[in-house]
Amino acid sequence: QKDLSSNLALSLASSIMAPAFLPQLHVVPKFLAPSFAATASICGRNAGTFKIPSRFVSASAVKNVFLGRRIPRNFRGNDRSRMSAMLSTTQMQQAIPKAREVGTPETFEYRVFLDGDSGAPVSPWHEVPLYVSKDVVNMVNEIPKMTKAKMEVATTEESNPIKQDIKKGQLRYYTYGDMLYNYGCLPQTWEDPNIVQADTGCVGDNDPVDVIDIGEKTLQIGEIAQVKVLGVLGLIDEGECDWKIIAINVSDPKAQLLNDIEDVEQHFPGTVDQIRTWFRDYKVPDGKGQNSYALDGKAMGKAYALEVIAETNKSWLALKQGQVDPNGLSLV
């Protein structure tokens, strides 16, 4: 195990995770921690940068370390076989945080927490890894498709449970109509309200980046899904930029057919325009005007969307590292 541990830690530090992605590593199995700390500096990183939550430190966390069951190419022979076997065990599946409801739905007290293996709450914003691969990310679902309650990660509450939004003392619902798709957020991202973005001319909306899953399966509140990034719309809502990543669940039957935004129109005709119109008009029934879009309302492709994700991930990291005033946001 010692040799496997050293090889795996070295691969984590030098192969799987390029330097830009190393800050994403928030889950390290117990037997890897010493070797990982010793080898992290290979990529010019201080091992102290890496937070290892005790509730995730277990052998079952190996699945999350590899973010999608990918085994490093430089693993050979017995090491590779042993790692493959480890990743396929039932124990690995238990590393995925499970949703836990507290209170009655559609009340002020209702919360959905994510719990780790130990049963302790896990932040869906800070402790769920962002990247699965270069164009597949984890999505934390907040609003199941074809529902009206406006659910969101509570960014100001400890452990960031999901709750129903409140405005003017009232629980919020979409009066425009049901949310047509699974709607959630990308963990470990943040739209910085202190920075004016060059492409939009607006500051961020102080939230994790929103993501729309156009797949056929209905996701539940708090469910974590791996989604393939396809494109992005730059919604401008009350003067703030509110990026809408368009993606599809990797388990969807049509996921393999979609690799960029152009494929959405071919295989899901009218979907992008439907999303664009929905978010433009959804506040009109409440007596407000239409929202607008940056970039002339164009749905940008996968490459642009991945840049948005990378930039907002950097903003989140700066927030977590104390380089930005959280101003009431909960970072634990």
Image: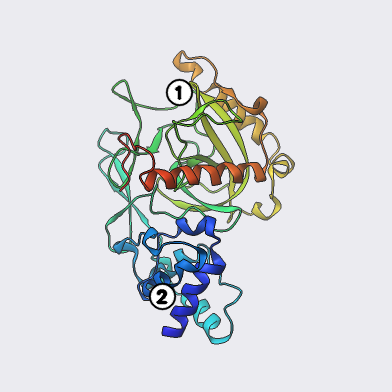
Q: Measuring from the top left, give residue 222's x and y in whole percent.
A: 40, 48
Measured as percent of width and height from the top left, residue 240 is found at 49, 26
- Callout 1 amino acid: Thr
Q: Which residue is the extreme one toward the bottom?
A: 78
The image's mark for residue 35 is 2
Which quadrant of the figure has residue 305?
top right
The residue shown at (55%, 31%) is: 197
Secondary structure at badge 1 equals loop
The residue at which mark 1 appears reads as: 175
Q: Give residue 25's quadrant in the image.
A: bottom left
Residue type marked 2:
Ser
Tell me the quarter of the image containing the N terminus: bottom left
Task: Say few, some or many: other residues with alpha carbon within 10 Å of mark 2 (under 14 / 14 to 19 / 20 or more).
Answer: some
Is residue 215 shown to the viewer in this render?
Answer: no
Query: What residue is drawn where x is 66% and y is 52%?
Result: 254
- Disc 1, disc 2: CB below 8 Å? no
Q: Secondary structure under badge 2?
A: helix
Q: Residue 318 in the image: state x and y as whole percent.
A: 42, 45
- Circle on res. 115: none
**Would residue 310 be found to the left or right of residue 46 on screen?**
right
Q: CA distance from mark 1 to mark 2?
A: 54 Å
Q: Can residue 206 be seen by looking at this rendering?
A: yes
Given residues 126 and 14, the one toward you in this image is: 14
Q: Is residue 88 above or below residue 123?
A: below
The image quadrant of residue 98 is: bottom left
